[in-house]
Each structure stands twice: as structure tokens, then as C-alpha cells.
Amino acid sequence: MYKSFTFTFFLLSSLVINAQCNVAHLNTQDVMDVMPTHIESMENLEVFKEKLKLEWQEMMNDFDEGMQVFQDMMENSESPTLIRIQQDKLEEKQVAIVDREESIQMEIDMYAEELRAPVIEILNKALDIVAERNQYYYVMDISSLMVAKGPDITQEVIAEVLKLDTEAATTPK
């Protein structure tokens, strides 16, 4: 009985130790930083953000001009009706600016998600290839992991990602 218990204990211990060897980690940010698809996506996102920023700035400039007209009207003691009309226009512009700010953020988020999808797809494919090749059951992202034990496969995944990214870029869409 004692021998079978000891044998079972050592057998289970070796399985646990073996399972622990099948855990690896990587830094996804390091991988994405070298991906041409990710780099291009981030550049496209910045161009898009800049375009929206200019649009918003034009709205703000228009509002500021309207505010200057309103202040001039107040200083020149214009007709109360004309002042009220200008004030209503300013209120409408202010509401439009607030609404546009909200929609701009939603548009940025949606576009970022659209750009992120192919990057994540390539990253996951590369990760699956490396994990299968090296028989890792679990791969953890070190950026969200406090203690990282096991091999760091970041460089191996980077190599695979670059290969897949190049294939994706040369494949007609």
C-alpha cells in the first residue's frame, strides 16, 4: 500500500512538473512594435485622428468667431433681437461641438478596432504556430503577468509574426 501511494505521488508530481514546463510567456507589445501591419495601422490611425482634430478645430474657430461677433454686438449695444439671434446660433454651435466630440471618440474607437483586428489575427496565428511547435499549453502575456516563469518566446513569435505579416501583405485581398 505504501509503495503504491509513493509511486502514485511521484507519478503525479512528475506530471505536474511536466505541465509546468509547458508554460511560456511573451511580451505582446514588443511583438506588435515590430509588425509592419501594426506600424502601418498606427500611422493610419494617427492620420485619421489628425483629420478629426482639424475638423474639430474648425468648429472651435467658427464658434470663437461667432463669440467675437456676439461680444462686438454687446459692446455696440445692438438690437436685443439681433443679440438673441446670435446667442442662439452660439448655443447651437456649442451643442454641435459637444456632439461632434462624442462622435469623434466613437469613430476613433471603431477605426482603431478595425485596424487592430488583422494585427491580432496575425499575432494569434504566430502564437499558435510557436506554441504548437514547442508544445506549450499556456502562453501568458508578460505585460499583464506579475511573475513570469518559463521560457520567453517573444523573439520566436516576432520571427513568426514577421513571416505571416509578409505573407499577408503579398497575398491579394
Image (cartoon, grey):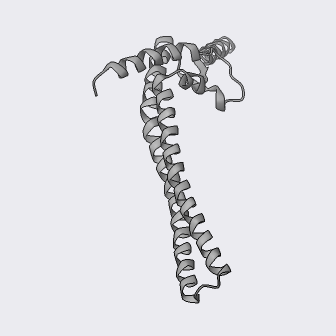
Which residue shows up at 50% across the image and 17% down it?
Answer: 131
Q: Is residue 140 left or right of residue 134?
A: right
- Where's the C terminus, which quadrant? top left
Seen as rendered, the residue at the extreme bottom is 80
In this rendered view, identify the residue nearer to me: 51 or 100.
51
Q: Quadrant of residue 154?
A: top right
Counting labels gives 0
In this rendered view, identify the residue nearer to me: 21 or 120.
120
| Residue 21 in the image, given as x and y percentages of width and height | 61, 14
Q: Quadrant of residue 63?
A: bottom right
- Where's the N terminus, which quadrant? top right
The relative height of residue 170 versus residue 42 in the rendered view (above or below) is: above
Seen as rendered, the residue at the extreme right is 147
| Residue 100 in the image, given as x and y percentages of width and height | 50, 60
In this rendered view, identify the residue nearer to me: 111 or 136.
111
In this rendered view, identify the residue nearer to me: 48 or 148.
48
Q: Quadrant of residue 70?
A: bottom right
| Residue 4 in the image, given as x and y percentages of width and height | 63, 13
Which residue shows up at 51% across the image and 73% down it?
Answer: 92
Which residue shows up at 60% across the image and 23% down it?
Answer: 30
Seen as rendered, the residue at the extreme left is 172
| Residue 88 in the image, given as x and y percentages of width and height | 53, 79
